[in-house]
Amino acid sequence: MEPLEPFTKPKAWRLTRCLACGCEAHYRFEYTLEKNAYGEVTCRACYWRQWAQEARQAMGAYADLNPVPQAEAREHAEKNGYDYLSALTAPSFSDDPHHVRCRYCGRLSAARLGGHRIRLPVPGHPSA
């Protein structure tokens, strides 16, 4: 992760850019340390892409491979107080991440789709 804002304190949200995929999102420094200790990537875009791919492989022939229309993801995000920025996979399936910005606090995040719905609010958000 490349920091795009100066460090202030471990619990403060800080804009970062993933060095692997380029997704910009806000993370707390303590969250990054926690994920590093588990050997898990901090970037939720990378994490959810991999998780969704593995879930589809595990489901085999039963996996839902119908792409989720971007307009549907956008509508759901906007109804829940988020600006929809983009799909983070192409095509985007039901469990793939999407890039969103909270209208309340302005934080950027990668939100996973599930059953054609963005799982909002994003974990760790004050409204969660």
Image: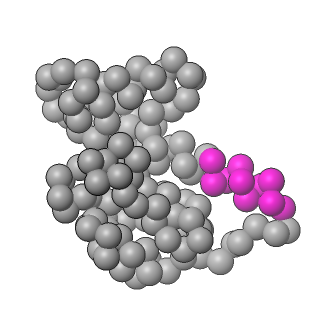
Q: State the residue at coordinates (17%, 58%).
A: 104
Kindly give the residue lying farthest to the front in the view shown.
Answer: 127
Does residue 16 show up? yes
Where is 21 relative to 12, above or below?
A: below
Residue 44 shown left or right of residue 79 in the figure: right
Q: What is the number of callouts on the image?
A: 0
Is residue 19 highlighted in magenta?
A: no
- Quarter containing the N terminus: top left
The image position of residue 3, as x and y in percent, is: 25, 29
Does residue 90 show up? no
Q: State the residue at coordinates (49%, 80%).
A: 69
Is residue 55 highlighted in magenta?
A: yes
Q: State the residue at coordinates (19%, 21%).
A: 9
Q: Which residues are magenta?
A: 51-60
Where is 75 relative to 103, above or below?
A: below
Q: State the residue at coordinates (84%, 62%).
A: 60
Where is 36 relative to 44, above or below?
A: above
The chief SS type of the magenta part is helix
The image position of residue 89, as x and y in percent, is: 51, 61
The image position of residue 84, as x and y in percent, is: 31, 68
The image position of residue 127, as x and y in percent, is: 29, 54
